Image (cartoon, rainbow, N blue to C red):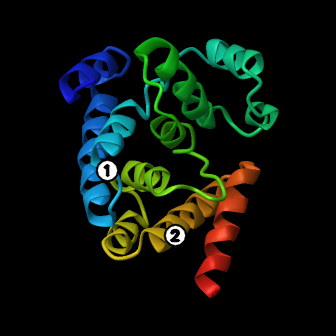
Amino acid sequence: MNRKQALKIVEEQLTPHRYEHTLGVMETAIELAAHYGADEKKAELAAIFHDYAKFRPKKEMKRIIEEQGMPKELLVYGKELWHAPVGAFLVEKEAGITDSEVLDAIRYHTAGRPGMTLLEKVIYIADYIEPGRHFPGVDEVREMAKSDLDLALAQSIKNTILFLMKKNLPIYPETFLTYNELTMKAED
């Protein structure tokens, strides 16, 4: 599937604002992939489809999580996480993308996971730092991403955890585990 075909499929699923975000994530992912030696075509495809399920009805996403045997904790830790694993499932089912690396990059772009692949890190960070993002800490992570992807990833996760804590919201366990892994790796 080429870029034009992928963007046409995705545009139908998103609001104009989210589509603009997706274009920013795509360009950022391609740049990061080129810089760090990830597959640029896979980065492009994963970035285009990363928010494919973002606006699906919550009822539908909950049903898919339950029926597909996805981690039950997803149902407890906030609906904002749902679109990533549900998106990976729907992208395969509806768009016919079967590349497991692309699907995993979509699946883990919100919560992360220990042992993230280079492509997964690229999509996670591209989503966080794309040019349309404006929030405290994003510029620091943008700078880090130029020289150390793991450091940028750890900082972005730290920022997210602190944001959720300030709002008294629960934090998905995989996110903590990912942060811990990156922090311990940095100490080695």
Residue at 73%, 35% in the rendered image: 74
Whether residue 76 is situated above or below residue 109 in the rendered picture? above
Which quadrant: the C terminus?
bottom right
Q: Are marks 1 and 2 in contact (CB under 8 Å)?
A: no
Regarding residue 168, the answer to whether it shows in the image is no
Whether residue 100 is situated above or below residue 167 in the rendered picture? above
Mark 1 or 2: in front is: 1
Relative to the observer, which residue lies in front, 112 or 40? 40
The percent coordinates of residue 104 (x first, y second) are 54, 40
Give SS at disc 1.
helix
Give SS at disc 2.
helix
CA separation in Å, label 1 and label 2:
18 Å
Relative to the observer, which residue lies in front, 170 or 9? 9
Residue at 43%, 35% in the rendered image: 50
Whether residue 161 is situated above or below residue 112 in the rendered picture? below
Is 185 left, or right, of 27 in this rendering?
right
User: Mark 1, residues whose alpha carbon is within 10 Å: few (<14), some, or many (≥20)?
Assistant: many
Q: What amino acid does circle 1 point to?
A: Ala
Q: Quadrant of residue 158?
A: bottom right
The percent coordinates of residue 167 (x first, y second) are 66, 52
In the orientation shown, which residue stands out farthest toward the left?
4
Which quadrant: the N terminus?
top left
**Residue that carries the numbered disc 2 in the rendered image:** 155
Among the two numbered marks 1 and 2 on one chain, the one whose residue lies closer to the N terminus: 1
Whether residue 27 is situated above or below residue 162 in the rendered picture? above
Is 89 left, or right, of 49 in this rendering?
right
Residue at 26%, 50% in the rendered image: 30
**Residue that carries the numbered disc 1 in the rendered image:** 29
Q: Quadrant of residue 52?
A: top left
User: Mark 2, residues whose alpha carbon is within 10 Å: few (<14), some, or many (≥20)?
Assistant: many
